[in-house]
Amino acid sequence: MNETSNDFSTDNPKIKLIRGLGLFDSMGIVIGTIIGTGVFLKTANMSQATGNPYIVLLAWAVAGVLSFSGALAYAELGSLMPDAGGEYVYLKEGYGDMWAFLYGWMRFWIGAPGSVAAYSVAAMTFLSAAVDLKFIGGKQVAAIAVILIFSLMNCLKVVLGGRIQGIMTSLKLISIFGVIVGIFFFSGSGTFEHLKESTAPANSLFSWLGISSFATAMLGALWAFDGWNNLSMIAGEIKNPQKNIPLSFGLGLTIIFVTYAMINLAYFYALPFVDVLSANSSLNPEALPVATKAALTFLGTSGVMILALICTFSGLSSMNAGIMTNARVPYAMAESGLFFKSLGRLSPTTHVPVVALLVQAFISAVLVMSGTFDQLTDYVLFSSWIFYAMVTSVVFVMRKKMPNAPRYKTLGYPIVPIVFIVLGILLLINTLYTMPLQSGIGLVLIVLGVPCYYYFKKHKPAGVSPAVN
């Protein structure tokens, strides 16, 4: 086929990405991607792992600081290389084509569709508490339906997608803070004495088992913080990226950190620790989520439906942001000649990677049918964190390669990125130890990308360059 005659070809210089996202839109992507369903669910798993409310809160705090540290480094890279694809671009510039390809390969097959599938499954799990989903075939069918609907919406102009995301994020924050206020001021059984309840032995955190349990709890919190990296993927469509990317990361993560701290403290204020332990999790799949249990203390039975709708909306907001940003990675790979050319095609009318969006939707739908929420998040997190640590180290490489280039400079450099990388490696080691099956699947998937890289490299067209404004 002659690609230059095809309306969707990125060989056509008139069809390029459009920088249409401002600061509000970018912050909406950061906050909207991160605050999904994990904060309403993961506290139960974390409590089961640690057996102590204070340790759970500490795990949330450490996960927040770790995510913030990574975002600071990503802000520098994003302001230095504001192109579509984010981490793919950074790894390509820092360590070459192969590591960039392996990241994109992982993101294409499990990172992006796995997170989209997890958000959709969790959202429909919440919705099923308020709406009978059996008439359309159950939660999985509903999850696939919303993936397709939102993917088609994102085939429209990126400006429209950004506005929708910003509005959804604002409404989500208002709803969450409404729940927090309701728990603290109107909960009939609320008391901070609940924080003193524990099932863990004294000083258990300082044992090897305690440290491992703490790291497992952190994995749950890190899923709730996951998505802080997504803004970099859509950097090629952000206005004034040198200013708006760092501001969006900084302001967005500060709002999230405060929100997560307050709502988790609210859970332990409203509920006895035993009620947190018995909330919805992989051990208690039919139980009410911890957020719903906490809301029942001031909303009564109507709390189930209200929280179900809030959490559903929150999950859909994160899913939408994930769909929008993640599709830019295979687009960037195709643009550099290292993936299927069709994935690099832009719509001539909306200037977005329509083919990449639709293929991502199909893989996400397949993953919806293949695993539970917790299984999907475990696969995504381990595979993603391998590259989070590696991408962060690119900051050091680019300081040497482009020392005088204008950029936002990482706060606390070099300590902040070093701490992030070291803690990230320790987290990966613990995950290999505690979840060998999930970790093994992630590693095998990445290794399978090696022969595929050499295939695409062999067939890479000459003179390929990104089509970014």
Image (spheres, helix red, strand yellow):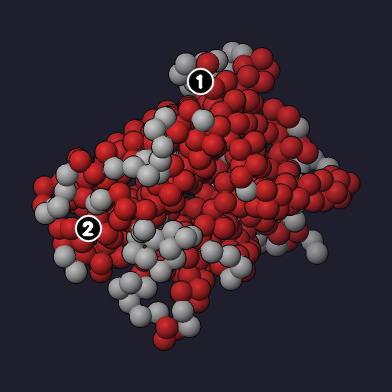
- Name which quarter of the figure residue 261 lies in: top left
Check if mark 2's residue and mark 1's residue have beta carbons within 8 Å: no
Q: Residue at x 79, y 61 (%)?
A: 2
Is residue 59 shown to the viewer in this render? yes
* Residue 465 percent across, percent down from the top left: 71, 40
Type of the residue with mark 2: Ala
Q: Is residue 388 above or below residue 354?
A: above
Q: Residue at x 33, y 72 (%)?
A: 129
* Residue 256 percent across, percent down from the top left: 34, 39
Q: Nearer the viewer, mark 2 or mark 1?
A: 2
Q: Is residue 203 above or below residue 293?
A: above
- Pointer 2 residue: 295
Q: Residue furthest front?
A: 201
Quadrant (top left, top right, bottom left, bottom right) of the N terminus: bottom right
In the displayed structure image, the side of residue 380 where residue 228 appears, left or right: left
Type of the residue with mark 1: Val
In this orientation, which residue lies closer to the viewer: 252 or 86? 252
